[in-house]
């Protein structure tokens, strides 16, 4: 039994030795790990003190190769949860929610993270004569690292009712009266895979503003349909 204990102890020492630094949490967890390359890895807890009128907070979540990944929760210094943010590639991605110190929902945001290694995405192109028909796709370069994309809602925290709604499409105000957030999603090619059926634009979806602007600009030309063909192919 003694030899088994010594063996397990050596394994534990070797595992910790792969990190430049770390701390041990109250529950015995290994937190705030920095690997030998100086990159943050695994579960982290970050403490920020009050500063120049800005209230301090603590946040907890995971790092992957020095970048935030997945759900991160933010708490006031009194222990109240004030935000849940989702990350991908170190940038906000998906739904983020913000709360008052009493737990009432204050704001709900929607973001789309951009893969820094492949900053391109594919958007649908509609038939000019039939706005419900998708005739092709066009690859566009996404500017920035995280884009407003989807529906943003602002709440009256005392009543819990929505007092303001904004719709965004790739960081630009979206037009139309779509009631479904999925109608604002372009085909996802961030992993260089073929477009998935559940991300295809639904029948009857509102046309993106970029397509509307294009149609107005080319309404008097003989060519009424843009097929979106391109010779660009994302780098695998």
Image (cartoon, rainbow, N blue to C red):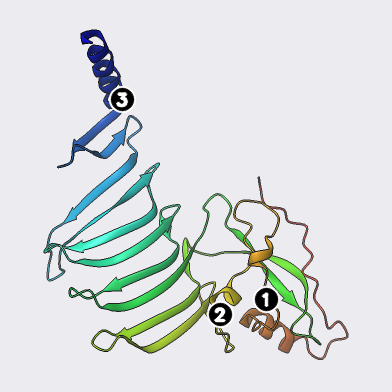
- Contact between labelled residues 2 and 3, with CB atoms less than 8 Å apart: no
Q: Residue at x 26, y 84 (%)?
A: 157
Vertical position of residue 190 compared to residue 207: above or below: above
Q: Position of residue 74 (x, y in %)?
A: 25, 61
Looking at the rendered structure, which numbered label has been put on residue 202? Answer: 1
* Viewer-side residue, 52 vs 14: 14
Instruction: Name the element at disc 1.
Output: loop
Corner quadrant of residue 214:
bottom right
Q: Earlier in the sequence, mark 3 or mark 2?
A: 3
Mark 1 → mark 2, Cα distance in angstroms: 10 Å
Tag count in the figure? 3
- Is 179 in front, or is 130? 179
Q: Are marks 1 and 2 in contact (CB under 8 Å)?
A: yes
Where is 89 relative to 77, above or below? above
Answer with left or right where residue 44 lies relative to residue 125: left
**Element at label 3:** helix
Q: Is residue 214 rendered to the left or right of residue 191?
A: right
User: Residue most toward the top?
Assistant: 3
Residue bearing the label numbered 3: 15
Name which residue lies at 69% across and 84% down: 204
Q: x, y (%) of residue 227?
A: 80, 71
Q: Which residue is mark 2?
A: 180
Q: Residues within 10 Å of mark 2 (few under 14, many from 20)?
A: few
Residue occupying image coordinates x 37% and y 57%: 71
Mark positioned earlier in the residue sequence (1 or 3): 3
Circle 1 Cα neighbour tier, 10 Å, few/some/many (<14 / 14–19 / ≥20): some
Does dot 2 land on a helix, a strand or a loop?
loop
Work out which quarter of the rendered image holds the C terminus and state it: top right
Disc 1 from disc 3: Cα separation: 49 Å
């Amino acid at each position: 039994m003694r030899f088994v204990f010594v063996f397990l102890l050596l394994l534990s020492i070797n595992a910790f030795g792969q990190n430049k630094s770390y701390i041990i949490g109250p529950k015995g967890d290994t937190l705030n790990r920095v690997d030998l390359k100086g990159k943050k890895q695994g579960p982290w807890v970050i403490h920020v003190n009050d500063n120049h009128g800005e209230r301090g907070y603590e946040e907890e979540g995971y790092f992957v190769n020095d970048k935030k990944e997945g759900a991160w929760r933010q708490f006031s210094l009194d222990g109240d949860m004030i935000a849940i943010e989702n990350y991908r590639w170190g940038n906000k991605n998906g739904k983020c929610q913000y709360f008052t110190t009493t737990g009432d929902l204050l704001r709900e945001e929607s973001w789309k993270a951009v893969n820094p290694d492949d900053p391109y995405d594919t958007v649908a192109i509609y038939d000019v004569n039939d706005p419900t028909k998708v005739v092709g796709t066009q690859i566009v370069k996404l500017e920035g690292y995280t884009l407003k994309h989807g529906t943003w809602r602002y709440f009256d925290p005392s009543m819990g009712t929505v007092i303001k709604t904004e719709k965004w499409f790739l960081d630009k105000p979206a037009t139309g009266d779509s009631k479904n957030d999925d109608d604002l999603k372009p085909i996802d090619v961030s992993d260089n895979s073929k477009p998935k059926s559940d991300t295809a634009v639904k029948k009857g979806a509102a046309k993106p503003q970029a397509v509307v602007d294009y149609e107005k600009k080319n309404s008097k030309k003989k060519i009424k349909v843009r097929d979106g063909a391109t010779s660009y192919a994302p780098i695998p």
